[in-house]
Image (spheres, grey):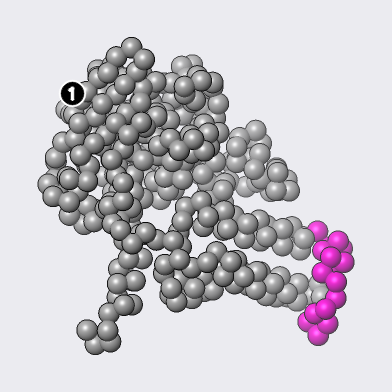
Amino acid sequence: MGRDALQRLLASDLVDVPVEKVLAAGEAQLAKDRADYLATEKLIDPKNPDKAMDEVEADHPDAAHLISEARNGLVGLQSFIEQHHILTLPSKMLPEVERKELRVLAVLGDSVTTDHISPAGSIKKDSPAGKYLLDHGVLPADFNSYGSRRGNHEVMVRGTFANVRLRNKMVPGVEGGFTKHLPDGAQTTIFEASEKYIAAGVPLVILAGKEYGSGSSRDWAAKGPRLLGVSAVIAESYERIHRSNLVGMGILPLQFLPGEGAESVGLTGEETFDITGIAELIEKFSSGACLKVQAKSSSATKEFEVILRIDTPQEALYYANGGILQYVLRQLLAASKRPAGA
């Protein structure tokens, strides 16, 4: 869909824009892009635009491939809008932020980099992203890399935690983007486990060691986990920019107390977690405040404290709105409703 068309729709009404309007604008933009492409490549006479497109596509596979990719992108836009309510912004700040019954998606060690979280390298045929591309008619030779497809959320969410060198302690001895789905205990890909949790309405948490999110700054290292359903990360420490990016995506960054970690607290990843008191700390912001976490397993219940790593009043505002996008949209909406000259 054309960026300008979407921006015009958003500018006209930030709340409750019907998906149908967005898709209609997208279809119109797609038709224009299609005609422009065919005319530019001299595959069709611009003076005869009514020539059957199917005939042209049949004779020119490159054009058919481009148009197929564009259509897939439009379907992806519809999926993204519907799944994540981008155009139905709740009017209330601080929606239900108490996190209860969270399941662990992964238990990670020290120095997990942004490339572990959101790799930029090649896409494997047997990976969730590779299977998605194959299902949409993309040949392996055209897969390219995650970095080149960073504009497609369907590919990037499937690539989150898909680094072949990732080690999730929930599945010992296995490298790559795999985890254990609970409570059934089945080993599966992180993306497939996420889909099951989302369908069941189960929020997720990541447990990690020191320097979580180190390496180069990468926006998809925060976007991807959010789309996987991750609501919180509990780590021993964070890379500065990545911690801030998590807040911007509405993911709660929590930090074990000094000298503590998942192993010392006795966490295996098979527990369910309750994190309470979040709203009060956000509304009465105080840097370095602590929260209580309760981890329940079939055999025991553990309670421990964590540090809330929302470090500034502005970050507290971002989180209270559900993330930086929602914050900006509310600011624009508020400005649009002010009387002229106010």
Image location (x, y in percent) of residue 213: 34, 39
Residue 206 visible in the picture: no
Query: What quarter of the picture does the N terminus occupy?
Result: bottom right
> Is residue 272 rendered to the left or right of residue 146?
left
Question: Going by the picture, which residue comes out furthest to the top?
Answer: 299
Residue 225 within the magenta-colored segment of the rendering? no
> Is residue 339 rendered to the left or right of residue 120?
left
* Vertical arrangement, residue 14 with respect to residue 302, above or below: below
Image location (x, y in percent) of residue 131: 66, 39
Region of the chain picked out in magenta, as a range? 45-61
Image location (x, y in percent) of residue 187: 54, 22
Image location (x, y in percent) of residue 95: 31, 51
Question: Going by the picture, which residue comes out furthest to the bottom?
Answer: 341
Which quarter of the figure has residue 289? Answer: top left
Judge the density around disc 1: few (<14), some (14-19), many (≥20) Cα neighbours within 10 Å: few
Task: Name the residue beneath numbered marker 1.
Answer: 259
| Residue at x-position 48% and y-position 39% | 198
* Vertical arrangement, residue 165 with respect to residue 27, above or below: above
* Vertical arrangement, residue 87 with respect to residue 216, above or below: below
Q: For this rendering, which residue is in front, 298 or 141? A: 298
Report the amino acid beneath label 1: Gly
* Vertical arrangement, residue 33 with respect to residue 172, above or below: below
Q: For this rendering, which residue is in front, 281 or 41? A: 281
> Is residue 281 rendered to the left or right of residue 210?
left
| Residue at x-position 22% and y-position 23% | 303
> Is residue 80 rendered to the left or right of residue 264?
right
Q: For this rendering, which residue is in front, 170 or 9? A: 9
